[in-house]
Amino acid sequence: MKLVIIEGVGKQDTIKKYLGSDYEVVATKGHVRDLPEKTIGVNVKNNFEMNYIIMPDKQSVVKMLKEKSSKADKIYLATDPDREGEAISWHLCNILGLDPNSPVRIQFNEITKTAIHKGLENPRAIDLNLVNAQQTRRVIDRLVGYRVSPKCCKAIQPNVSAGRVQSVALRLIVDRENEIRNFVPQEYWTMVANLNKDGSEIFKASLAKHNNKKLVPSNKEEVDKILEDLKDGNYVVKNIKKSVSKVKPAPPFTTSTMQQDALNKLGLSSKKVSKAAQELYEGVIIGSEGKVALITYIRTDSVRVAPEAQKMAQDYIRTNFGEKYLPKTPNVFKVKNSAQDAHEAIRPISLDRTPEMVKQYLSPDNYKLYKLIYNKFLASQMTEALFDSVVVEIENNNYGFKCSGKTPVFDGFMKLNSKKDNKQEDEEDGENNKLPEMNEGDILNFKEMVTTQKFTKPSPRYTEASLVKEMEEKGIGRPATYTPTLTLLTSRKYVDKDGKYLFPSELGEKLIEFLMKGYEGLFNVNFTADMEEKLDLIANEGYDYLAVMKKFNDYLEKLVGQTIEPEHTGIMCEKCGHEMVKRVSRYGEFLACSNYPKCKNIISQNQNNEPKVVAKCPKCGGDVIERKSKKNPNVIFFGCKNYPTCDFISWEIPLEEKCPKCGEYLTQKEVYKKLRKKCSNEKCDYVVTMEKSKEESK
């Protein structure tokens, strides 16, 4: 009996089907050995020796693996084809007593019979460079967590954490929020002339220049002067440029671009995309065929396509669309210099399994994502689209107007796009005018001028898709880290959502404010991207991983050992005359004397601010105020100001309004951006939900 050990239990049946009765397939369900949870587990003074232990929840899995391996004639380690998978295989060698230098490791990029048997025919030793890269990342992340996170907990509140990648992603969100807050809108105007020629349909031409210099009116006075200058002049065609423009197909999906398109086009969250992609990769039950994998490996930053996949696409396009949709040579897309390029792009395993053929076997999310991946790959292997384009320059009294239009000549890869997608692309290019035939010197008929006042806008808040795009472009993290990072930011309440947009919570902003005071050098884009490059060098070229860890640890110890300068206030201590400085405790900000420990004067900032009154007490008629839980300052409740004389407390704001059913007072709470009113009487079921007013939304 031959034993094949894989990582994810979801693909166990798919792989077993292709191997037959001579093989047994078992899954580790992820990592089985790791650094301990409650201690740092890394001896920085002894070449960063790592104290690995069997994870508590994997004891039974390890016991099963040992029993199975003791009876196996041959053992193959077929964990995922990435650094984490390589590290898991290395750990299994240690646990099961296998020689990592012997041919025990097999890998495949897709779960097909051909790919699996090809992997079995070409076993190899464990790639220690990949293992060392994974271990370096793990140790560095552990050092950050154990050295910086306790500082955050002490300064802000318990159970907050700093992370090498997560905190930089959070900083991007906080920086964007500050940019939006500080943005000063600038007024500008657009001027669009509605014109036609000899009774043709009206087309639009936008003001672009004055005396051959770019012109954007900045106020109404400028607009009025331009209108005055134009009113007695003629709109004359000065220049016409005709050309055939080409639109090339985009490359097939990487992890990042898949997540971006799935959110923008399908409305799927990063978490839902990852779940659906994992299921499509591991296999879904297709009728009597059983479990079948539909797409290739889903964690990749490469747009490379395997030659056999190109041949598959050529045959399919020739048969189903015709020779004219097939490029003379296969389309090849440039892989980014920063890409690991360990695996090809995400693509369907077989183009014969069309989305419509398998739709009945897929969940709605899985079907939508499979169709997106399928069409993206197929389009990437088709010919470019061709358009007859025309750009017309029109002049009136030294003011230049411009209009453009394009007419499809050959749809090429766009044949796969929906009409909505093609229309959107046209609008994004600014070419949606149907223009009449014109010649230089033609005088056009003026119909009206449409002037519109506008104001510049700040960059929009990040969505999950645009944040992933930013992380990829700046080299923050890698494909396998995008979804876990987003999940962590929201689960720890560092980030909230407004529709699809992300914005930092108060806790998230406090965390970044603290980190920027003393650890800015660690939690910035350049430092994080540089570390990712070093990890790539370790993985690809055998770079000295111990040297990387030592240099990082030396820098981290220097940062952690420094004294973070408190914020000055200009307020003098009433006891000794020294300046009061702002400090942070687990319960919030307070002012402390800079002459500490000689002077221990402190001022709670709440002493200078009256607590917020939200309602009248239904028990005694006193003021109901916001209060914070002593155990968790982020938890707000409402209590009577006359406490302890009056013991009224509530998790929701009490209202003077009475319940129409039973006469008890109502309470109010914001739920999913709406206001919910319900009866305070637990036995009464009266509840009503309404939209917030503009004043309440501020």
Image (tube, rainbow, N blue to C red):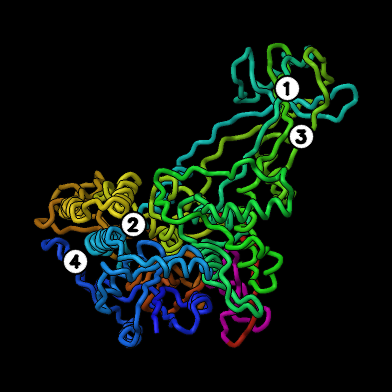
Q: Residues within 10 Å of mark 4 (few under 14, many from 20)?
A: some
Q: Secondary structure at mark 1?
A: strand
Which callout, 3 or 1, points at the residue further toward the start of the chain? 1
Quadrant location of residue 102? bottom left
Secondary structure mainly formed by the magenta segment: strand
Q: Residue 502 location in percent, x, y?
A: 50, 55
Residue named by callout 2: 511
Question: Does residue 660 belong to the magenta stretch?
Answer: yes
Residue 447 placement (x, y as % from top left)? 83, 24
**How dense is the environment of label 3, judged by Cα within 10 Å: few (below 14), some, or many (20 and up)?**
some
Q: Marks 1 and 2: which is nearer the front?
A: 1
Residue 108 screen position, x and y as percent: 45, 65
Q: CA distance from mark 2 to mark 3?
A: 53 Å
* Picture residue at 35% right of the left edge, 73% below the top: 31
| Residue toward you, 66 or 403 | 66
| Image vertical order of residue 335 relative to residue 155, above or below | above
- The residue pinned by badge 4 equals 42
Q: Residue furthest front?
A: 121
Report the Cα–Cα distance between label 3 and label 1.
14 Å
Q: Which numbered disc, 4 or 2, marks the residue that appears first in the sequence? A: 4
Is 291 placed above or below 597 here? below
In the image, the segment drawn in magenta is 653-682
User: What residue does disc 3 label?
Assistant: 407
Q: Secondary structure at mark 2?
A: helix
Question: Which amino acid type is shown beneath numbered disc 4?
Answer: Val
Q: Along the polypeptide, which appears first: circle 1 or circle 4?
A: 4
Residue 287 falls inside the magenta stretch: no
- Which amino acid lies under the numbered mark 3 shown in the image of this protein? Thr
Q: Nearer the viewer, residue 451 or 500?
A: 500
2 or 3: tag closer to the N-terminus: 3
State yes or no: discs 2 and 3 in contact (Cβ < 8 Å): no
Numbered disc 3: secondary structure: strand
